[in-house]
Amino acid sequence: MFFALLRLQADGLRLALLGILTTLFLVSTQVAQTPSPRVDSANRTAGSPVAVTWPTADGTYTITNFRFGAGESLPKLRLHYLTLGTLHRDSGGHVDNAVLLLHGTGGNASSLLAPQFSNVLFGPRQPLDITRYFLIFPDDIGHGSSSKPSDELHMRFPKYDYDDMVTSQHRMLIEKLHVDHLRLILGTSMGCMQSFVWGETYPDFTDALMPMACLPVPIAGRNRMMRYMTIKAIEDDPGWHGGEYTKQPIQGIRTAAELTMVMGSAPLYLQKIAPTKKVAEAYVDDYLAKRVPPMDANDTIYFTDASRNYDPSAHLDRIKVPVIWINSADDYINPPELGIAQKYAPKLAHGRFVLIPISDATRGHGTHTQAEVWKDYLVELLKESEKK
């Protein structure tokens, strides 16, 4: 059929066909060269997204004598991170394709490799295609394989906060990865709050910000109450021993996990998947069976309290880059009826706030990881913030 078409006498048609064939060849070549994530179906549950193993590179950077904002210091602060893709520099030698992806409280560098996030964003011709972008996933201070209280210092570990996390991320980028500029910062939950801190502290370091599932005001009201209850549940457990326990204070940790489940829950979704007493109770038992064993009491206290002095509200005008800030209407932690987002979004010079309506696709606070729900906004932000 192709040869018959090529024999057409009209030069215009012949040239057009050649152009189409060339385009198809280039697209197929790009797909062939794209790193192929490995499908991991061993632990997949029915109805869940297909899990894949992305070709991440693993790294660690140690900062000597890191000084925390509260005045304490650590002789060696270990920062662990993962990367995906290849770093690229423009004609001036500056990095132009790095994206910083920030996890939530209690998460780690692998949190945003979850299939409902990574499968939707990282593949060929997707918004954060790893053949185009260099993706960076840090373990924040107190999380994952980075330095944390459970290493050895316990409650003597420096009292870190979000400012310390952002400072350490910046130093890791500059000193270890030699990244002098970011194309985008996308942060979820705690990472959302860090995105606002980033935008104010280093206003020229990134082209765009996408904070998801947070508010740019002090943690107060019900949010702080639940954090306080989490901390007190652990500290009041007789097995805590001021942080010098030989085995985890299980009742305190269990209560902390239960509060976390409630805070992150989505009523519509839970009603749908647990329509009976038996199913609902089994869901809780399964959640706690998975959530409680890896938890550490001191680490939980520290990362729960790291938000204690967070407050970017007074300096949102320092953020000059394009911002699309997204919350979901069923977010129990950041409920829309507070009206906070509507009040503060106008203070962003080039930003806007998007409230995702409740639907079968939203997951309460966890909507920040359901990329299919909001990926079109990411595409819009990347287009808006492109260098002209």
Image (cartoon, rainbow, N blue to C red):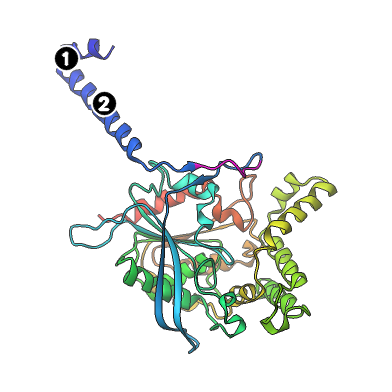
Picture residue at 77% right of the left edge, 55% below the top: 285
What's the amino acid at mark 2?
Ile
Q: Residue at x 70, y 63 (%)?
A: 292
Quick one: 289 or 306, which is closer to the camera? Answer: 289
Callout 1 secondary element: loop
Task: Decide whether residue 111 is among the magenta residues.
Answer: no
The answer to whether residue 272 is above or below residue 253 is above
Residue 43: say if magenta.
yes
User: Does residue 200 appear in the picture of this structure?
Assistant: no
Helix or strand or loop: what does disc 2 sit on?
A: helix
x 67%, y 82%: residue = 244
Q: Residues within 10 Å of mark 2 (few under 14, many from 20)?
A: few
Question: CA gap, disc 2 to disc 1?
Answer: 16 Å
Quadrant of the rendering where the N terminus is positioned: top left
> Residue 73, how many percent across, how many down?
47, 86
Q: Is residue 28 left or right of residue 80?
A: left
Q: What's drawn in magenta, residue-wise?
A: 39-45
- Residue type highlighted by circle 1: Ala
Pointer 2: what residue? 20
Quarter of the image where the C terminus is located? bottom left
Q: Is residue 44 left or right of residue 111?
A: right
Q: Of the residues under marks 2 and 1, which one precedes in the sequence?
A: 1
Closer to the camera, 144 or 226?
144
Kindly identify which residue carries mark 1.
Answer: 10
| Most common secondary structure along the magenta stretch | loop
